[in-house]
Amino acid sequence: MDTATANPLAAKSTLVFQAPLFNLIKDSDYEPAIEAGMKKQLEEVRVIVENKEAPSFENTIVAMEKSGQDLTRAAKIFFGLTGSATNDTLQAVKARLAPKLTAHGDAITMNDALFQRVKAVHDGLATDSMDPVRTRLVERYFTRFKRAGALLDAKGKEELMKLNEEEANLNTRFQDNILKARSAAAVLVDKKEDLDGLDEEAIAAAAESARSKGHEGKWLIEIVNTTTQPVLSSLKNRALRERIFKASIARNSGGEADNSAIVTRLAQLRARKAQLLGFPNWAAYVMDDQMARTPESALKLLAGLAPAAARNAKAEADKLQALIDKQKGGFQLEPWDWDFYSEQVRKTEHDLDEAAIRPYLEFDSVLVNGVFFAAEKLYGVTFKERHDLPVYHPDVRVFDIIDTGGKAIGLFYGDYYARDNKQGGAWMDSFLDQCGLLGQQPVITQNCNYVKPAEGKPLLLSFDDVTTLFHEFGHALHGMLSRQEYPLFAGTATATDFVEFPSQINEALATDPAVLAHYARHYKTREPMPAVLLEKMKGARKFNQGYLTSEYLAAALLDIEWHSLGADAPLVTDVAAFERAALEKYGLFNAHVPPRYKTNYFSHIWGGGYAANYYAYMWSEVLDADGVAWFHEHGGFNRPNGMHFRSAVLSQGGSKDAGQLYRDFTGRDARLEPLLERRGLN
Ligand SMILES: [Zn+2]
């Protein structure tokens, strides 16, 4: 058929490093290419399953690793574009493809004949001696099937499927309730003077919100996901602060959008799923596949931080009360006062004048003299911009990634400006992952959302923007410097409680004195940033950490406690009592510092994919702080240390257990102290 050959996604690109053919690809090419890719992979799986030869590593595992190349190629470019430069056509294609891609994945993991072959290869591991990477590859395949229930008998599979279906329905109902309650909790304000303290932009937004909901001439304060609300740091009217805080914290408890029955049933059904799959509870099931391995080790970390966090939060509260008293407030600190008074403390103690800092943080200097400079300093890689490859938008920049010997090893696409058709935030992704088996070199992307300056004007960043740029580039390096044979282990394909470790190490380079001195120069005069600004920037990082650490830990511990219930535990009937008991257990029940998310509106764990995983943020940060300490103990961020990190961690992708990767790098298990020191919690 002509149409197949005419589709530029149907075959490997002939450009250098298989760079996507953005000059030829049309919106209408994605759907047929992805559909054809799914069909082809199922055909490849059928051939593997029907192979008359006995199952082997080559004819089963390697064959699976080689399958689905057409699908992966088209899907990666497609999802890259729907994130960076989407349109109605692509969005409609995405909606149509979503259920088909889920069904496609299920058709492979639920294929029992395929599982029997994987199991045969896995059983053979006992007698065959294979190198550790191949052994791990077999184990990962086997584990993936096992975790989806492949070892269950017919009755067990049926029950698991029913539970999965019920869980998906409850997830959806939970999320619907979240939206309903958030909307219902919005606070309507009659008089403009009650908004004293908010800036004009926020007041205008509140007026617009009120108007759009039929309250012309009033102001509507919308509620965001977290317990504490952004407006609380500047609203002077204490009674209004109280109304807003109480509206936020009461969400989804009682009333029409009550989530209590949903979360208690979810906790119960997950416990039953875990039992079917051979684990005492859902947290044990989830963490078995993570670096943490067991809920006990995650709890040890979180509980280890709790006393210092609680102590510091108490000291911060005392300081806020002293400020209230000094101002003759005549009241006791309440949770709705915290942000308002801590903002005043922040301003007097750490005033970071953004406007004074920005001229020293010009984007091109940060990228070239900071991010790229640090990558060369540590890993010997350099970046050379090229203008001959097609891009999906004229603002996208393409660079050759050049290794120590002068040889290009892949491509890097930087897309830095905000656009209406781009999702928010900053992220790393890839159009193609490195892997030896398929002869692929990495084609890595980085997206940010900086407001594009007017022609001839410089793009000046905030220090937050700078750390984010370094952070995302750390993920990018993980992809670029991957040296793996198998696609399953390429680049960032690691446990979720480990994947932020390389990015956070790179984030630390933003404040390395040598790196900072190299990029932080005034865009007009090239003068280095004054020392006093630098000190303020560093000091501000330790501010309010007792509160911030406590509210995070409270949420992370609630997550684990809910998912530590066993299948035999009775259904929880009183969510508030459960929550209070859980927090008291760790010394974190503090009316001034409520959890970042309370149980009934904790979307990460009940509506998204973060059940028993919320601890992972802190887990990665412990690794990062201890890893940075390792660099300092060994002479700092220099080439020999960088090359060691590159070979022990960055090149290894997911080819080893994450704990092993960490020990290969530092020669020890991660210690808590560097994190306590960083957060000023000692
Ligand atoms: Zn990250």
Image (tube, rainbow, N blue to C red):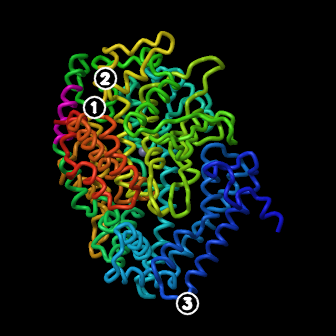
- Where 669 falls versus 421 (above or below)? below
Q: Secondary structure at mark 3?
A: loop
| CA neighbours of label 1 inside 10 A, class few (<14), some (14 to 19), many (20+) | many
Q: Is residue 328 covered in magenta?
A: no
Q: Are marks 2 and 1 in contact (CB under 8 Å)?
A: yes
What is the number of the mark on residue 346? 2
Q: Secondary structure at mark 2?
A: helix
Point out the tag, 2 or 1, that comes first from the N-terminus: 2
> What residue type is disc 3 on?
Lys
Which residue is found at the position 31% from the left and 61% from the top?
A: 562
Q: Which residue is mark 3?
A: 52
- Where 657 falls versus 358 (above or below)? below
Point out the tag, 1 or 3, that comes first from the N-terminus: 3
> What residue type is disc 2 on?
Arg
| CA neighbours of label 3 inside 10 A, class few (<14), some (14 to 19), many (20+) | few
What is the number of the mark on residue 544? 1
Q: CA distance from mark 2 to mark 1?
A: 8 Å
Q: CA distance from mark 3 to mark 2?
A: 71 Å
Residue 37: x and y, percent? 66, 67
Which residue is found at the position 21% from the left and 33% from the top?
A: 680
Front residue of 330 and 142? 142
Which residue is found at the position 49% from the left and 34% from the top?
A: 221
Point out the tag, 3 or 2, that comes first from the N-terminus: 3
| Region in magenta | 308-320
| CA neighbours of label 2 inside 10 A, class few (<14), some (14 to 19), many (20+) | some
Residue 659: x and y, percent? 28, 57
